[in-house]
């Protein structure tokens, strides 16, 4: 009964707000999706002519990954994709964000040195794309989710200026083979992580610890490669397509809604570290060049001695117009205006809520990040990843109960909805992840899925959160 009255009151309120023209809730055609990445779910690491990539190699080095696990089999989506698409359909998922395993379609990464295109790999993605479309699910392709072909790494990987051409060739192939059906693309996923951890801190594949000059060169090459891929996709897809990036960074949100705290959070979010190790996490370093056509002045100042030569032509390429601004968000840092007029980080209270992987739960971050990033870059927004790891297991009743995850999604989506109602143009949201998968250096230790995967049998079980997501999608978030 109470529920009934609440719903009535809600609907009444809804109609009133619509009448006075205020935006209410999510857009009608909002894209509710789920995401994965090739190395994390596909498996079939040595099947059908696929080449090696840097994660195949990195995982085999003892000590790099939790219990020396690897993605050789992962969720075996390579063979089980039909089952996974059926599960997506059951859960009302409108879009699937997946990545292409570069070495699966071009085993050596490029044909420049005699390499070839692997037709068996192309066939796999054609089957997956067709299956998605046949079931009413929109494919969203990420070109690069960290699994660089090993043969390109041997040539220097992101440090080699030629990667711009290699990436453009790869993007052209994707456009030519999948572009007749796939309308949405993300170029690179979290360059902050694959460069910051992979090339600077040495804790992700390929495990390098580059100096400042080499590292900044990788950053610049990555940005140029992104631009070259945008051009290649537009030039070679036989239909108009939409393109963006999927970066991440250090998100800041205000302690209170006072103008001072809001200004402090915004300032902190786009501030620039003096050291490249920190600066790579500053949104402005990666995103200003792409979205605004120039590096932030503070970056030019801080890194003038170690930046590669930057030409006008480079900046034109890097800022080739994109259609939307995507980003992955898991948590943020509460910030306030300090007494000295400078932003100050607010210490988290003892016992602050944390996920199983020990990341703080900070739903407000999604409201403020979308607002700040929309204000700065003015493009429609996609949340390309958001979700949490829990200590999931199959209960005695055969189900997977994950109330923490439901609460997490509920809280974050309430905040996202607020941002939409405050005028942020939000196009879509992808839950991370569709299913439990290989969580990089944490191996299979952390489960992020809304579908549980029993790795020994490859059996999938929809978690309670999966059903919750299904019902929330059915109402387009109006019940949040
Ligand atoms: C992101 C990454 C995903 C996934 C997720 C959860 O950084 O893009 O691949 O691992 O974190 O940790």
Image: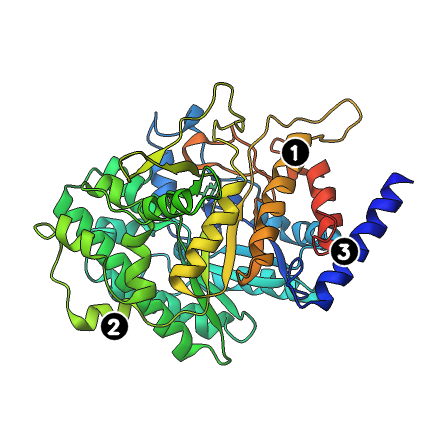
Which quarter of the image is occupied by the N terminus? top right
Location of mark 1 (residue): 457
Between discs 2 and 1, the one toward the N terminus: 2
Location of mark 3 (residue): 13
Compare residues 468 and 169 and report the one nearer the observer.
468
Residue at figure coordinates x 74%, y 49% from the top left: 479
Q: Is residue 409 left or right of residue 373?
A: right
Q: Is residue 354 above or below residue 477?
A: above
How far separated are the C-alphas under marks 1 and 3? Answer: 49 Å
Count the marks. 3
Q: Is residue 403 left or right of residue 263?
A: right
Is there a contact, CB below 8 Å, between mark 2 and mark 3?
no
Determine which quarter of the picture holds residue 401: top right
Q: Is residue 161 left or right of residue 150?
A: left
Q: Disc 2 beta carbon < 8 A from ligand 1? A: no
Mark 2: give few (<14), some (14-19) or many (20+) Cα within 10 Å: some
Determine which quarter of the picture holds residue 171: bottom left
Compare residues 368 and 287 and report the one nearer the observer.
368
Is there a contact, CB below 8 Å, between mark 2 and mark 1?
no
> Tag 2, which secondary structure?
helix
Residue at figure coordinates x 63%, y 48% from the top left: 80
Q: Is residue 323 above or below residue 383?
A: below
> Tag 3, which secondary structure?
helix
Q: Residue furthest top?
A: 350
Location of mark 2 (residue): 316
* Callout in the foreground (2, 3): 3
């Amino acid at each position: 009964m109470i529920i009934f009255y609440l719903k009535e009151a809600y609907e009444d309120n809804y109609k009133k707000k619509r009448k006075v023209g205020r935006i209410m809730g999510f857009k009608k055609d909002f894209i509710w999706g789920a995401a994965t990445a090739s190395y994390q779910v596909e498996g079939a690491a040595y099947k059908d002519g696929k080449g090696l990539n840097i994660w195949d190699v990195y995982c085999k080095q003892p000590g790099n990954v939790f219990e020396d696990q690897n993605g050789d089999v992962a969720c075996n989506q390579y063979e089980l994709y039909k089952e996974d698409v059926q599960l997506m359909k059951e859960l009302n998922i409108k879009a699937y964000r997946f990545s292409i395993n570069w070495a699966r379609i071009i085993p050596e990464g490029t044909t420049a040195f005699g390499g070839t295109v692997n037709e068996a790999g192309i066939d796999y993605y054609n089957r997956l794309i067709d299956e998605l479309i046949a079931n009413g699910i929109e494919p969203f392709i990420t070109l690069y989710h960290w699994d660089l072909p090993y043969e390109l790494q041997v040539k220097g990987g992101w440090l080699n200026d030629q990667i711009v051409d290699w990436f453009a060739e790869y993007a052209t192939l994707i456009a030519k083979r999948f572009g007749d059906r796939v309308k949405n693309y993300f170029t690179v996923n979290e360059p902050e992580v694959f460069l910051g951890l992979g090339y600077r801190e040495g804790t992700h594949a390929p495990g390098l610890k580059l100096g400042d000059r080499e590292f900044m060169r990788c950053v610049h090459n990555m940005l140029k490669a992104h631009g070259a891929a945008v051009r290649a996709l537009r030039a070679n897809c036989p239909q108009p397509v939409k393109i963006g990036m999927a970066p991440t960074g250090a998100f800041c949100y205000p302690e209170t809604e006072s103008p001072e705290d809001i200004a402090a959070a915004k300032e902190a979010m786009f501030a620039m570290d003096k050291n490249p190790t920190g600066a790579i996490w500053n949104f402005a370093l990666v995103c200003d060049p792409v979205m605004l056509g120039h590096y932030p002045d503070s970056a030019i100042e801080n890194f003038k001695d170690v930046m590669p030569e930057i030409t006008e032509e480079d900046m034109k390429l890097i800022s080739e117009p994109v259609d939307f601004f995507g980003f992955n968000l898991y948590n943020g840092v509460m910030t306030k205006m300090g007494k000295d007029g400078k932003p100050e980080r607010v210490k988290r209270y003892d016992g602050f809520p944390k996920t199983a992987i020990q990341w703080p739960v900070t739903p407000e971050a999604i409201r403020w990040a979308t607002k700040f990033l929309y204000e700065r870059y003015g493009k429609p927004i996609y949340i390309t990843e958001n979700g949490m790891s829990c200590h999931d297991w199959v209960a005695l009743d055969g189900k997977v109960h994950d109330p923490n995850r439901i609460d997490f999604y509920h809280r974050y989506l309430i905040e996202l909805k607020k941002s939409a109602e405050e005028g942020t143009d939000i196009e879509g949201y992808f839950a991370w992840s569709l299913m439990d998968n290989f969580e990089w250096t944490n191996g299979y230790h952390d489960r992020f899925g809304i579908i549980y995967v029993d790795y020994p049998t490859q059996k999938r079980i929809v978690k309670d959160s999966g059903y919750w997501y299904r019902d929330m999608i059915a109402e387009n978030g109006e019940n949040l």
